[in-house]
């Protein structure tokens, strides 16, 4: 039986947000759980994230947004992936996101939202249970 390849996850910081400690902690936790992780660094546009996700052949994109622009940036990544024929790449995210914004983001295609205080163990478990290699 062929061995299944490791999950490939892109962790990205869209927009002008300059705080990336949380993104780095999540990226390291995913890597420590055996996934291949690509971290894009700060100040990425949705277009840059979509391009990198396709080039790196990832299974999912994890977005970290602390700036309050989640209602624009997260759907822009989902829409950008769909427009490029890569809508099967799952998008999940976290940051300072009010509870009232979670359902509308999910309705726009964001698979999961992790709010402040979510443990890295919970995020890793969610990824392991919900993301499959493409």
Image (tube, rainbow, N blue to C red):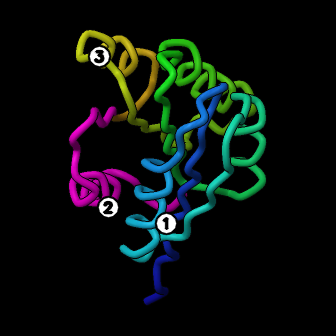
Q: Which of these two is toward me, 25 or 123?
A: 25
* Residue at 31 percent of width and 59 percent of height: 124
Q: Is residue 119 magenta?
A: yes
56 left or right, relative to 27: right
- Tag 1 or tag 3, which sits nearer the N-term? 1
* Magenta residues (range): 113-134
Instruction: Tell me: residue 5, above or below residue 18.
Output: below
Q: CA distance from mark 3 to mark 1?
A: 29 Å
Q: Residues within 10 Å of mark 2 (few under 14, many from 20)?
A: some
**Residues under numbered marks 2 and 1 in contact, where contact means CB atoms less than 8 Å apart:** yes
Q: Nearer the viewer, mark 2 or mark 3?
A: 3
- Tag 1 or tag 2, which sits nearer the N-term? 1
Q: Which mark is residue 7?
A: 1
* Residue at 51 percent of width and 38 percent of height: 63
Instruction: Tell me: residue 72, above or below residue 55.
Output: above
Q: Nearer the viewer, mark 3 or mark 1?
A: 3
- Tag 3 or tag 2, which sits nearer the N-term? 3
Q: Residues within 10 Å of mark 1 (few under 14, many from 20)?
A: many
* Residue at 66 percent of width and 26 percent of height: 16
Instruction: Tell me: residue 34, above or below residue 8.
Output: below
Q: CA distance from mark 2 to mark 3?
A: 25 Å
Q: Residues within 10 Å of mark 3 (few under 14, many from 20)?
A: few
**Residues under numbered marks 2 and 3 in contact, where contact means CB atoms less than 8 Å apart:** no
3 left or right, relative to 97: right
Q: Give the SS element for disc 2.
A: helix
Residue 4 horizontal/vertical position (percent): 47, 77
Residue 85 horizontal/vertical position (percent): 70, 34
* Residue at 53 percent of width and 57 percent of height: 9
Q: Is residue 125 magenta?
A: yes
Q: Which mark is residue 128?
A: 2
Q: Where, quadrant-wise, is the C terminus in this rendering?
A: bottom right
């Amino acid at each position: 039986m062929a061995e299944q390849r490791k999950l490939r996850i892109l962790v990205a910081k869209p927009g002008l947000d300059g705080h990336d400690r949380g993104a780095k902690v999540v990226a390291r936790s995913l890597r420590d759980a055996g996934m291949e992780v690509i971290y894009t660094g700060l100040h990425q546009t949705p277009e840059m994230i979509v391009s990198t996700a396709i080039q790196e052949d990832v299974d999912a994109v994890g977005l970290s947004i602390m700036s309050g622009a989640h209602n624009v940036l997260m759907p822009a990544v989902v829409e950008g992936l769909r427009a490029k024929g890569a809508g099967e790449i799952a998008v999940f995210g976290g940051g300072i996101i009010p509870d009232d914004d979670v359902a509308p983001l999910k309705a726009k295609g964001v698979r999961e939202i992790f709010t402040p205080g979510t443990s890295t163990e919970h995020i890793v478990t969610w990824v392991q249970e919900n993301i499959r290699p493409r």
